[in-house]
Amino acid sequence: MKNIAGLAILMCVCLNLFAQEAELGSDTLLVQHPKDTIPQRDIMDMMLRMRYTNNEITGLDSSDKSKTHFALVPAAGYSLQTGFAVIIAANTVFNTGKPSTTKASSIFTCVSFTQYHQLIVPFIASVWTPNNTYQFVSDNRYLKYPSLTFGTGPDALTNKGYAIEYYYLKLHETLMRRIVPNVYAGVGYYYDYFWDIREKQNTRHRGVPEPIPFVLNKEEKAAGWVAKVNYDTRPRLINPSKGFYASVLLRHNPKWLGSTSKWSSGLVELRKFFTLPGRAKNVLAFWSYNWFTVAGTPTYLMLPSTGWDDYFNSGRGYIQGRFRGKDMVYLESEYRFKILRSGLLGGVLFANAQYFTGSPERSNSVWAPGGGVGLRLKVNKLSATNLAIDYGFGLNGSQGFFVNLGEAF
């Protein structure tokens, strides 16, 4: 029993550390709750009580922010596009300066093997210089990705998806500098490469072959520079209870850098959080994620699409890639509330809507609402990290579970 409890404790520590890089940059390692009158609880507390006495628990110190924290553990996951996944994850969190004046830096990687024979290997880093003058953000991923795709425009509403397979390499590097308090601006280089793109066997009813009704390239490349500006007043990035976040990004992909086609895109993201009156301190949260083709024609897999934001969280209620088009406008709201006053268990109600303008060659558009409910299990009370288990639904019977570490936004 003690060994099982110890493994669970280690996994909770790893989940806490992983959550700190979930938005590519965290505040200090801990979140304090000095005004709480009800003792807050999390999974860690439950596991500690299985292994240690009360006196031993009191002697444990997990709050030393000056140390480098490292974890390597197995984990598991689930999504509609991947099915169940077995994961080996590693994470390190450290400070480059004084913890009181410098945000925690983090490096995360894992290897995921999924039920649908996918291989997913991210390597994500967020490094802050002393006093938060600069932030270096590195988002790199390798995917072997059998998956479903649904085409563009209104056709995606009715078809049941087409099976494709491809390999994907993502290298996104950005350097941000503080301009004034809460405002960072910077430039970077983004490289996306899809290769060995091929159609798998797709059949209609009774086994009649059905070819994909749109063109797939054998490979797609997009390479270019980005300019980015962030404004952030959230007191913490993990499960914020108040504050405002805004980000504007412009990306240009010239052919002379190796892009398959010349095109430019823009991304405008807004998040707002309100703490509602009352002792429970429930939260009302809003998210706007808007992805536009500014010029040129992106290749098919580079078009804006459901669930292809950086953290694959948009469009709960639909499978990843369910809708795709030249432009995407996405809105979501969520009500977050406590079920237990200790904070160990909570819940959410959410609703979203997504709008796509069709393919670059067609003017047809599509919009799709979604919504659902979810449970929140507190993984670590110090960082406010939750295990999120949601059930979402959308049009034409689309529905399923969505499991995530941390909130969707």
Image: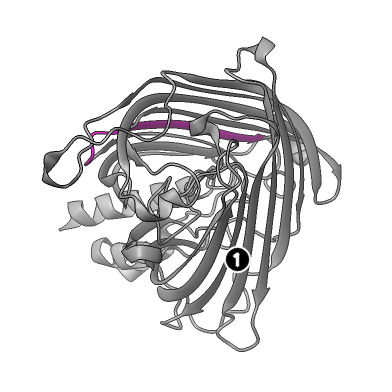
- Which residue is at a point 41% across and 82% down the rendered structure image? 340
Q: Which residue is mark 1?
A: 32
Q: Is residue 367 left or right of residue 5?
A: right
Which one is in front, 107 or 31?
107
Label 1 CA crowd tier, 10 Å (few <14, some 14–19, many 20+): few
Please state the horizontal and vertical placement of residue 337, each as a whole percent of the image: 50, 79
Identify the colour scheme used. Answer: one colour
Please state the horizontal and vertical placement of residue 34, each as a whole percent of the image: 62, 74
Q: Is residue 68 visible?
A: no
Q: Is residue 321 left or right of residue 258?
A: left
- 19 lies above or below 378: above
Q: Is residue 124 magenta?
A: yes
Quarter of the image where one finds residue 248: top right
Please state the horizontal and vertical placement of residue 323, each as a whole percent of the image: 47, 49
Please state the horizontal and vertical placement of residue 21, each as a whole percent of the image: 54, 44
Quarter of the image where one finds residue 276: bottom right
- 222 lies above or below 207: above
- Which residue is at a point 47% across and 75% down the rendered structure image? 349
Which residues, given as a range, are shown in magenta? 115-127
Q: What is the quadrant of the N terminus in the image? A: bottom left
Q: Residue furthest right?
A: 180
Q: Is residue 301 magenta?
A: no
Q: Residue furthest bottom?
A: 278
- Which residue is at a point 40% across and 57% down the rendered structure image? 318
Q: Is residue 54 left or right of residue 356?
A: left
